[in-house]
Amino acid sequence: MWTTIAQFTWIDIVDVLIVAFVFYQLLLMFKGTRALQMILGLALVYLASRVALKSGLLTVNWVLQNLLGVWFLLIIILFQPELRRTLATFGLRSHLLRAFARHEEAHMIDEIVRSTVSLAAKKIGAIIVLERETKLSEFVDSGVLLDARISRRLLESIFCTYSPLHDGAVVIQGGRVTAASCLLPLTLTTDISEELGTRHRAAIGLTEETDAIAIVVSEESGSVSLVEAGTINKGLDAQRLRRLLGEYFGPPRSGGSDGKSREVTAPSAVGG
């Protein structure tokens, strides 16, 4: 043992640090996804196979070693969407792909603004939730999974009155429409305007618990609101909504919710 330690050079240290860094980044990317549970199970099977080998249980070790290959294939087959989004997130962290990320972000904001303006003009109620740092997996699981590229036509179709998915919220993760008809928690705050309906209360409740952004279109008035950390920006037009989304999805902002909702009224409402 001491001989091995004595032969340990700075190259070996760099080697270990690189492997540790890669594993750490993989854990961060898979955190909050169902694939993480499968990966942990895979690690336990591997450890069990090593223990069986050391103990002389050759048959048990053979079974576990073959199970590792099957388990790895199951992860790839069952969790293709999660793995695709995870790898995409890892790629978008690099400097070479940041330009592409900015293009996708601009596309997402543009499609959301256009669909919101259209829904507001028709007085079709809607609530669109955009995930930021806090994972929204539990709310996604309460709805219908879609995993579709965001587009104006898709959002308008979802919130169409006769659509079976129009009740509930649409959740957007990583620039993709992950799920529709999702259930959100209603706020417990009592000091909010009586004019605000269920959609606004759900948007407040969600943003009090998470750092997500919620866009609400009122079915009664056709007005557009943006809710963040319990703060309501009401009566937004297309230009102001676009600017706010650009600000929120830029560099991280400091501060959080104080547990109370606040209202900010913009000077003009959304037009057709």
Image (cartoon, helix red, strand yellow):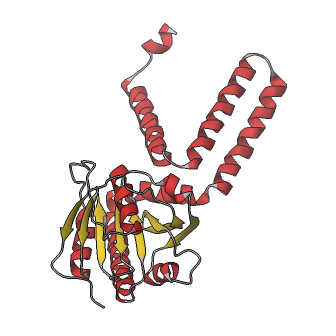
Q: Nearer the viewer, residue 205 or 150?
A: 205
Q: Residue at x 39, y 84 (%)?
A: 119
The quarter holding residue 250 reads bottom left
The quarter holding residue 143 reads bottom right
Relative to 54, residue 144 above or below: below
Relative to 151, residue 132 above or below: above
Q: Residue furthest top?
A: 2
Q: Is residue 93 visible?
A: no
Relative to 250, residue 195 above or below: below
Q: Residue at x 35, y 70 (%)?
A: 215
Q: Is residue 78 visible?
A: yes
- Where is residue 134 shown, x and y percent of the image? 39, 51
- Where is residue 263 shown, x and y percent of the image? 21, 64
Q: Nearer the viewer, residue 116 or 52?
A: 116
Image position of 150 (left or right of 214): right
- Where is residue 255 shown, x and y percent of the image? 21, 48
Q: Residue furthest right?
A: 59
Image position of 111 (left or right of 55): left
Image position of 179 (left or right of 272): right
Q: Quadrant of the C terminus?
A: bottom left
Q: Residue at x 24, y 48 (%)?
A: 258
Q: Nearer the viewer, residue 11 or 190?
A: 190
